[in-house]
Amino acid sequence: MGKLNSIPLLCSIAIAILLSTPIAHCKIAQGPKAVENWFQKLNHAKPKMTKLHFYFHDIVSGRNPTSIRVAQANSTSHSPTGFGLLAMLDDRLTTGPEINSTTIGRTQGIVGTASLEEFSLLMSLNFVFTKGKFSGSTLSLLGRNTVLNEYREMPIVGGSGVFRLARGIATAKTHTLSNNGNAVVEYHVVVIHY
Ligand SMILES: *[C@@H]1O[C@H](CO)[C@@H](O)[C@H](O)[C@H]1NC(C)=O
Ligand SMILES: *[C@@H]1O[C@H](CO)[C@@H](O)[C@H](O)[C@H]1NC(C)=O
């Protein structure tokens, strides 16, 4: 038990010391045995809360879109809510809203217009962290995004790496929406994990 407690503690110290170094992160053991060991020690693990704040850049137009339409129904173009469209995205995640802001990962997934009555999306996304202390870990979001509302609350249903068994809530807010459809969306995420 002493050993188990000391590992996360050392990690937090390392993170605190190296917070300013973007590549600092805790390596988590990979592989089926490591995952099994992790589960066996779970009884002694304390849940902790982590807050994340980032922006994602949804680029739908121009030469290098990161979000592309992959399918739609014949009726989609006649639908007042654009019902029946699917898009695949691999959007940059950054620390700030500016286009040249530091990249910390990607948002990869599929989004669909899922409401006949209002403009609302089914979001099925993975936040893939590639920099900072969560590098190599992911969080999975599955939720409903009522895009025209100021705040959209969506469940975080799981994760990998340091976010194994994570659950939480993501709150999205549109930061900017350009005429060409490109959007910068601000995300606040709070997760419980171990
Ligand atoms: C959709 O539109 C295409 C082209 O007009 C047509 O060939 C096809 O039968 C339509 N599909 C359905 C399900 O209505
Ligand atoms: C980002 O671009 C803006 C305007 O082009 C510039 O003022 C700023 O210094 C840049 N920031 C970084 C971190 O490069």
Image: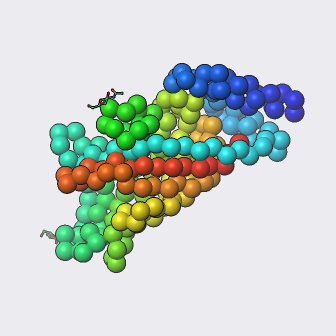
Left or right: residue 102 compared with residue 141: left
Q: Is residue 155 above or below residue 91?
A: below
Q: Is residue 83 above or below residue 51?
A: below
Q: Residue at x 53, y 29 (%)?
A: 132
Viewer-closest of 142 and 16:
16
Q: Is residue 47 above or below residue 114?
A: above
Q: Name the quadrant containing residue 157.
A: bottom right
Say whether residue 71 is visible.
yes
Q: Residue at x 41, y 38 (%)?
A: 96
Residue 52: percent from the left, percent from the top? 55, 43
Say whether residue 68 is visible.
no
Residue 102: percent from the left, percent from the top? 40, 31
Q: Is residue 72 above or below residue 191?
A: below
Left or right: residue 12 compared with residue 140: right
Residue 186: percent from the left, percent from the top? 42, 49
Left or right: residue 90 compared with residue 172: left
* Ligand 2, image quadrant it occupies: top left
Q: Name the quadrant containing residue 163.
A: top right
Q: Residue at x 60, y 37 (%)?
A: 161
Instruction: Give the quarter of the figure containing the C terminus.
Output: top right
Single out the residue that lies furthest toward the right: 2
Residue 1: percent from the left, percent from the top? 87, 33
Left or right: residue 41 compared with residue 184: right
Q: Residue at x 23, y 70 (%)?
A: 76
